[in-house]
Image (cartoon, rainbow, N blue to C red):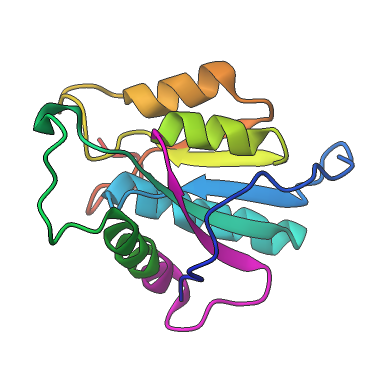
């Protein structure tokens, strides 16, 4: 599913019509929260006939002191992750207007950059990092504070409840 040439260069901004979402960007990292964000982004994109960019960003870990295992390929790993997320929501074939993208950089920075030409950014409330007790992750907080377009932060539904209680 992932186009190997899909490392994002920021697309040209579209003229924004108030109340219309021409381009929606959703960040995924494989977490339950990001999969639920993708489901919500799909619902909105379907309702508004929007294009949807499913973005997975990666960056080198700080703690490795520059030593990377020779078998580690972050682009490949991110592509597998974004493909699995897309398949869990769309099935094996992505519809027209839905793209998957791999980008090098911190997830917040990449999504903030994408917000410059997006009409809506959708992100999960918590990803795979951080402390388990936080209700809002640092990536979603940073995006909400610095995005250039509206941001929807999605909390995952917990089994058996609608509100997570």
Q: Is residue 44 above or below residue 106?
A: below
Residue 95 position in % (x across, y down): 61, 77
Q: Is residue 43 above or below residue 110?
A: below
Tell which of 138 and 9 is nearer to you: 9
Residue at 65%, 40% in the rendered image: 120
Residue 112 falls left or right of residue 140: right
Residue at 75%, 57% in the rendered image: 48
Residue at 38%, 69% in the rendered image: 83
Was residue 101 drawn as part of the magenta stretch in this picture? yes
The residue range painted magenta reads 86-106
Q: Quadrant of residue 5?
A: bottom right
Residue 125 falls left or right of residue 39: left
Tell which of 1 and 69 is nearer to you: 69
Residue furthest to the top in view is: 145
Residue furthest to the bottom in view is: 92
Residue 24 position in % (x across, y down): 65, 49
Q: Quadrant of residue 131?
A: top left
Residue 107 position in % (x across, y down): 41, 36
Residue 48 falls left or right of residue 87: right
Q: Is residue 145 above or below residue 122?
A: above
Residue 122 falls left or right of residue 79: right
The quadrant the C terminus occupies is top left
| Numbered marks: total | 0
Residue 132 position in % (x across, y down): 15, 28
Residue 157 seen in the current view: no
Was residue 136 drawn as part of the magenta stretch in this picture? no
Residue 116 seen in the current view: yes
């Amino acid at each position: 599913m992932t186009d190997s040439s899909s490392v994002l260069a920021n697309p040209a901004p579209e003229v924004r019509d108030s109340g219309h979402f021409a381009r929606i960007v959703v960040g995924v990292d494989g977490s339950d929260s990001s999969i639920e964000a993708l489901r919500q982004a799909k619902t909105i994109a379907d309702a508004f006939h929007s294009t949807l960019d499913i973005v997975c960003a990666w960056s080198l870990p700080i703690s490795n002191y520059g030593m990377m295992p020779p078998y580690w390929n972050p682009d490949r790993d991110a592509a597998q992750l974004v493909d699995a997320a897309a398949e869990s929501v769309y099935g094996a074939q992505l519809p027209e207007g839905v793209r998957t993208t791999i980008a090098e950089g911190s997830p917040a920075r990449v999504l903030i950059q994408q917000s410059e030409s997006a009409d809506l950014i959708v992100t999960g409330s918590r990803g795979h990092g951080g402390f388990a007790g936080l209700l809002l992750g640092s990536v979603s907080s940073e995006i909400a504070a610095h995005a250039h377009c509206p941001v929807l932060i999605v909390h995952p539904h917990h089994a058996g409840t609608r509100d997570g209680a």
